[in-house]
Image (spheres, helix red, strand yellow):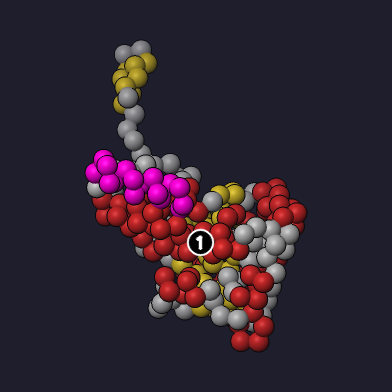
Amino acid sequence: MNREFGNTEIVATPTPSADLLTPDNSVFVFVDHQPQMFFGVGSGDRTAIVNATVGLAKAAKAFDVPVILSTVAAETFSGPLLPQLAEVFPKEPVIDRSTMNPWEDEAFIEAVKATGRKKIVLSGLWSEVCVALPALSALAQGYEVYVVADACGGLTPETHAHAIQRMTKAGADIVDWIPVLLELQRDWARTETYNAVVDTVKEHDGSYGLGLVYAQRFIGANAAG
């Protein structure tokens, strides 16, 4: 788009906003997606939360974004990391903690710092404790926090909503997994990640995924958003 101001022509070029999530400025953090924690979730359908979590994980993998996996009391109380999540990152270490707030665990903090990223894409269980507490702590230390609401779960719909409100008030951005995936892609001409994005959508995004299956059958292999 060209705009003329007096005798000066200004040419606007399409450049990504520094405010957007990119594969180069973000780190994805998965907190306490574990059996015992899922048992306590009453804020929404647990299968849907699992699906959103795995879809989010595959988004990180497709774009080679750094990932931090963390559990709490895995050997004594909460059980192992969600198997479907571990399957996406079979070689990724899992930081097990005793603290309810991951931001009070030295190994966790050092893992975040080691990425050099300031935008934290955060998901986990439960929304009101092990998600809200690190979100508030990270925000207080100058990080940008994007809470992936549909990959989180709380004890009740009310406590989940209150946690979202608390984090929003503190400055967190509330997002969902599909918008995160598409924000990373942003341009269907990015062929190096196109197939992985489409495959993830088809596998984990219900009606939109089915729409892509339909479109590719009747329109062609390159049909997308």
Residue range of the region highlighted in magenta in the rendering: 205-220
Disc 1 crowd, CA 10 A, few/some/many (<14, 14-19, 20+): many
Give the x, y percent position of residue 86.
46, 74
Q: Residue furthest bottom?
A: 76
Residue visible at 54% across and 76% down in the picture: 81
Give the x, y percent position of residue 135.
63, 59
Left or right of 71 on screen, residue 136: right
Query: Could you say which is closer to the camera, residue 26 or residue 224?
Result: 224
* Quarter of the view holding residue 103: bottom right
Residue visible at 54% across and 51% down in the picture: 176
Indicate whether residue 211 is drawn in magenta: yes
Indicate whether residue 79 is drawn in magenta: no
Residue position for label 1: 51
Compared with 95, 126 (above or below) is above
* Quarter of the view holding residue 107: bottom right
Location of the N terminus by quadrant is top left
Give the dominant element type of the magenta stretch: helix, strand or loop.
helix
Left or right of 193 on screen, residue 78: right
Disc 1 marks which amino acid? Asn
Compared with 45, 186 (above or below) is above
Left or right of 214 on screen, residue 130: right
For residue 186, say whether it is visible: no
Residue visible at 35% across and 19% down in the picture: 3
Give the x, y percent position of residue 83.
49, 75
* Quarter of the view holding residue 25: bottom left
Location of the C terminus by quadrant is top left
Give the x, y percent position of residue 127.
67, 61
